[in-house]
Every structure is written in structure tokens, then in C-alpha cells.
Image (spheres, helix red, strand yellow):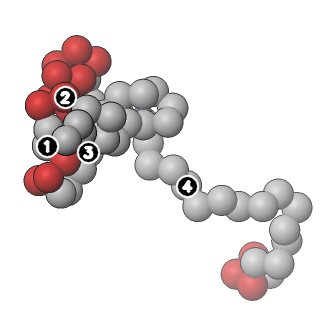
């Protein structure tokens, strides 16, 4: 069973992201963290469609 491709990485910086599941603490992930470091990108914001002025709190 090969799990080497199961390391969750950030789509932006391609570094390993923080995981909560101990099952994801793999040797491959640890090696990536040592090599590249952890992802430090800010959390993705909720998508806000431009031009949508229907926010009830904005009036
Ligand atoms: Zn990142």
C-alpha cells in the first residue's frame, strides 16, 4: 500500500498544511516539512462575489 501521494499540501505554496488527523502525520509529510516548512498562508476567506450589494448589514 503506497500512501506517499496522500500528503495534504497547500494549493498556493505547495507546502504541507496543518492537519488534525494523526493518520496524516506520515513520514513523507514530515520530510516535506523539514525540506520546505509548513504552509503559512492565511486561511482562505469565504468567497465574496463582487458587485453583490445585498448585505443586510450594509444599509
Ligand atoms: Zn500555503
Q: Nearer the viewer, mark 3 or mark 2?
A: 2
Q: Within the image, what quadrant is residue 40 found in?
A: top left
Q: CA distance from mark 3 to mark 2?
A: 14 Å
Q: CA distance from mark 4 to mark 2?
A: 29 Å
Q: How many marks?
A: 4
Across and down, in percent, residue 13 comes to 45, 27
Q: CA distance from mark 3 to mark 1?
A: 10 Å
Q: Nearer the viewer, mark 4 or mark 2?
A: 2
Across and down, in percent, residue 59 comes to 80, 81
Across and down, in percent, residue 2 comes to 23, 37
Identify the mark at residue 18; answer none if there is no mark.
3
Judging depth in this view, the residue of 13 and 2 nearest the camera is 2
In the rendered structure, which disc, 4 or 1, sits on the residue that comes first in sequence? Answer: 1
Which residue is at a point 51% across and 50% down the rendered structure image?
A: 44
Secondary structure under the numbered disc 2 in the rendered image: helix
Crowd around label 2: few <14 · some 14–19 · many ≥20 (10 Å): some
Secondary structure under the numbered disc 4 in the rendered image: loop
Amino acid at each position: 500500500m503506497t500512501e506517499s501521494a496522500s500528503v495534504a499540501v497547500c494549493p498556493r505554496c505547495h507546502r504541507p498544511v496543518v492537519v488534525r488527523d494523526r493518520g496524516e502525520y506520515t513520514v513523507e509529510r514530515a520530510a516535506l516539512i523539514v525540506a520546505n516548512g509548513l504552509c503559512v498562508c492565511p486561511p482562505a476567506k469565504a468567497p465574496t462575489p463582487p458587485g453583490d450589494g445585498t448585505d443586510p448589514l450594509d444599509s
